[in-house]
Image (spheres, coloured by chain):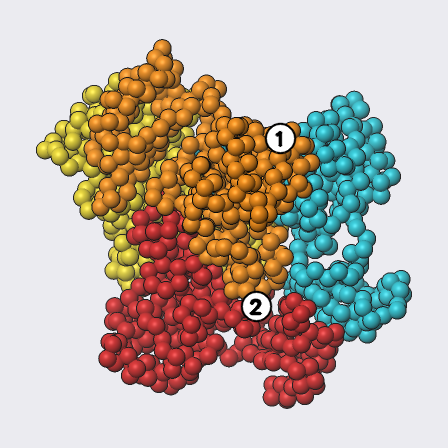
Chain colours: A red, B orange, C yellow, D cyan
Amino acid sequence: MHPYTDITGRLLICCPDRPGIVAGVSQFLYSHGANILDASQHSTDPREGLFFMRMVFHLENTSISREQLEADFLEKVALPRHMEWRIDYTDHRKRMAIMVSRYDHCIMELLWRWRSGELEVDIPVVISNHNDLQKLAADFDIPFHYLPVTAQNKAQQEQQAITLLQQQQVDFIVLARYMQILSPDFVKEFPGRIINIHHSFLPAFAGARPYLNAYTRGVKLIGATAHYVTNDLDEGPIIEQDVARVSHKHAVDDLVLLGRDIERQVLTRAVKAHIEDRVIVHGNKTIVF
Amino acid sequence: MHPYTDITGRLLICCPDRPGIVAGVSQFLYSHGANILDASQHSTDPREGLFFMRMVFHLENTSISREQLEADFLEKVALPRHMEWRIDYTDHRKRMAIMVSRYDHCIMELLWRWRSGELEVDIPVVISNHNDLQKLAADFDIPFHYLPVTAQNKAQQEQQAITLLQQQQVDFIVLARYMQILSPDFVKEFPGRIINIHHSFLPAFAGARPYLNAYTRGVKLIGATAHYVTNDLDEGPIIEQDVARVSHKHAVDDLVLLGRDIERQVLTRAVKAHIEDRVIVHGNKTIVF
Amino acid sequence: MHPYTDITGRLLICCPDRPGIVAGVSQFLYSHGANILDASQHSTDPREGLFFMRMVFHLENTSISREQLEADFLEKVALPRHMEWRIDYTDHRKRMAIMVSRYDHCIMELLWRWRSGELEVDIPVVISNHNDLQKLAADFDIPFHYLPVTAQNKAQQEQQAITLLQQQQVDFIVLARYMQILSPDFVKEFPGRIINIHHSFLPAFAGARPYLNAYTRGVKLIGATAHYVTNDLDEGPIIEQDVARVSHKHAVDDLVLLGRDIERQVLTRAVKAHIEDRVIVHGNKTIVF
Amino acid sequence: MHPYTDITGRLLICCPDRPGIVAGVSQFLYSHGANILDASQHSTDPREGLFFMRMVFHLENTSISREQLEADFLEKVALPRHMEWRIDYTDHRKRMAIMVSRYDHCIMELLWRWRSGELEVDIPVVISNHNDLQKLAADFDIPFHYLPVTAQNKAQQEQQAITLLQQQQVDFIVLARYMQILSPDFVKEFPGRIINIHHSFLPAFAGARPYLNAYTRGVKLIGATAHYVTNDLDEGPIIEQDVARVSHKHAVDDLVLLGRDIERQVLTRAVKAHIEDRVIVHGNKTIVF
């Protein structure tokens, strides 16, 4: 976690698990002048037999271009090992969109952390189906787009949003309590690139009104879950979860209030992990390095 | 939480919420020579309008008998206010039975805390459908009863257990990972007096194999839930819950291992609250003072 | 924690512990038409023999004035029992000042929770020895006063601040990472009414550079402490503390970053407890109901 | 964390940080038929410039002996890079001694986890200066040695203990609330191999009576710290810490009771990390992989 002022690359790989992968990848990087700063790996159950790795490296003693590095990697390392892989570089700041309804706590947390330098992204666009948070976005000098939605215009409104997000070349979208269910058409435009915060510890209390349902069941913990959006509501791969302790003294309104703090923290940690290329989606689960 | 060497009474009440209850009860106790050591109260939502209270008192300057105190309380305080109530005294040590299968972690935790003086109960009987833990019970000088269960003898085995529990005048039963589902006939003998530990954060992963299901879903927290047993499996009033953080690195076996620690702590806290008369069951929820 | 729209009173008392206090106080309130909504009590070690109580009540069926109520209480309840006491009413919103230097995380958290309605105070003034946070205060429509401080003008600057705080009839002051040590002259103007956030789990790492010292010692947890300011630096009564887990991977800068989250949460909880009259200072310790 | 039934090696290294270490080590292991199962690395601040790594590997396709492997590693990898290193193999079960006084909670936790298979060590000896826990050790079939200590016989008693520990070829010693301060002569026999549990979150409340001091200071969290013993009391490298929340309601006895749970957990986690060769001591700090 040291501050390296220079540009680093982050390599994520997934391939069949067999001997020699760490040696092969690290030898490749070394021979191309890259110094490995951090590495994490994970092997799944032997029956499944998959290997995952994240390597952060620093290109310091090399005149090789990124294109050449990646072409070599593909040929010499990735193809022989049937690897899925990608490299992201820290000089490409990801472009993050925020979609929001009326609650300000999640977007406030994201914008404050972004302004403080903790979230290393650009935020070219905030989209909302209400105009309540227009001033908030303005306080942070972020463009705000008001796209109201009704039962009638929903398909059209989503199309407007897609166009806007594509024009802004958005890398990923954060639903910071956006109280609309996105259609399959929307989701398929941004596969694995939409992060939602759900206000319960999934799989408990999926769907609407989780705090009311938590109150009714009498649980002693409430939680929040950040996950990638798929077409199965609240069923996508979980990135991060957390909980807080409650008691019989908490009315539903108290749960909502307390829950805001958990939502803010869980969403922030998930977004940060995504920005730092720490998350690999595998099936309906995540590996978070 | 000071150590009062003398005997204290614990009064639990539930009644319609209206002005004057605290004044009425505390005035009654004062006028009968009782000093209030601790008091907690809870009012439900005004639409429901119920009032709950736990008062711990010390009978120091009185020659009145407990029978007379309770008769007076019934007439002067409880009846006019349509109260449900009870008083337990610390010189009546509750009698706790433990039912267990093969896992030793929960019973070990209970027995160790009992021996160290933290759980102020008597433990007249351990019942198990296996004989694996016979030596463990013997190490703590607790009578162990081996009542094996099969598909054929289940009703009969339960009847043996009921007889044994009644002979031993058991006040409540702790299912310390007893891997059998109790029949309605058994449950109705001990209403609100059977505490179970379930190895998930209910309502998530009710039923069998919660750790496997947690693994499959890819949650980032696993938990445990202590609850009173009702005839709806894993649906009874929750007393206590807690969780621990897990990651993609945890295989199912690791979840089982880590889960043992949560189960031990959650069950212990629930049992302790029950022993100290801190729990009031209201509908399918608990108030834990 | 139910939303009572009407005005409530919060009575805090401290007196020698002896039988009949709860009865006396609750009978007094009842006879004056007050309904007790919540009550908490605490008895210290019998050798010390003190009794503390917080009662929240609702004046609903009474035509009595507050002055009369308090005069009666003094005469009939407080004087005979040698009580220290006070009553605060929820229709008097406390006036909170914030003093801050350059870090924005603590003030941001307070202002956002204030705007969202969670902190029921007025904030008539922000004072800073830097002008970095002027725009932030403006975004929330809070008056910002820039009072720079040097070795030469420190006494004078403090006097300006005192005058300003008194003009604004401030009830209490929050030092939201105000990086100056207040002089005894300043502190004595606001006894028990200045809340500071220190960025360590006191008493560990008192004084300057706690994160650096935590790093050097190699602790596995870092923390934050909210306390009332006295003239002994970082020695005042602790209101709230919390910690977060760290490892060898955290450089000092990472501790600072992570610490911000703990500071925000701990300070907020302490301020909220103070606003809701939940804190009684007793010697150098607090009772937080 | 998968259960590999076969024997694995655990390589720990420390050396100056420069490019090519991961490549060099992993290439060496691969070329000797070792498959890397897990790897973690850490680079210190560039000014210090040190590199630490733990690699777990599986020797599957090799006829080479361990002696030859280590001789080759020394010559080809370690010497050129000025490495400190060691390899432990899982078929050498470490031999752990426990030293204890009268409190049973820490030793009980260790023995239970050992019996359940969670701690993969042999426990050839328990040493105590009291004989209270003789039966407990017997229940677990562990040899118990009663070596009483007085002001007069302390040096002699320590020498007896050293002889016993050496006869038993003990790899490391756990002070599971052993209430004696070990002399420098004792400590130097087992450098970096004595783990102590201290009942506070160090550096707060070092020395005697930490719970009393925590009570007097009025902290809102109490903690425990597991660390390696050096000749500076409570100043050795910290392995693990944790805390629990307390309030004004907790008398000193309550802190002691609650503290037991934290001590048990913290000590267990530290011992487990030591057994699994996850800890590297660097100066007065630890890297815990």
> Which residue shows up at 45% across the image and 65% down it?
A226
Q: Is D130 situated left or right of D189 in this image?
A: left
- The quadrant of the picture occupied by the C terminus of chain B is top left
Q: Is residue C12 above or below residue D269?
A: above
Q: Residues within 10 Å of mark 1 (few under 14, many from 20)?
A: some
Q: What residue is rendered at 24% in x and 47% in y?
A: C3
Q: Amino acid at mark 2?
A: Ile
Chain assignment, label 2: A
- C22 vs B190: above or below: above
- The picture places residue B38, in percent across and down from the top left corner, at 37, 28
Q: Position of residue C208 (x, y in %)?
A: 51, 48
Pointer 1 with pointer 2, Cβ within 8 A: no
**Three-letter code for the amino acid on which mark 1 is drawn:** Ile
Label 2 belongs to which residue?
Answer: A287
Q: Quadrant of residue D106 in the image?
A: top right
- In the picture, measured across the screen, residue B126 lies left or right of residue C100, that is right
Residue denoted by label 1: B142
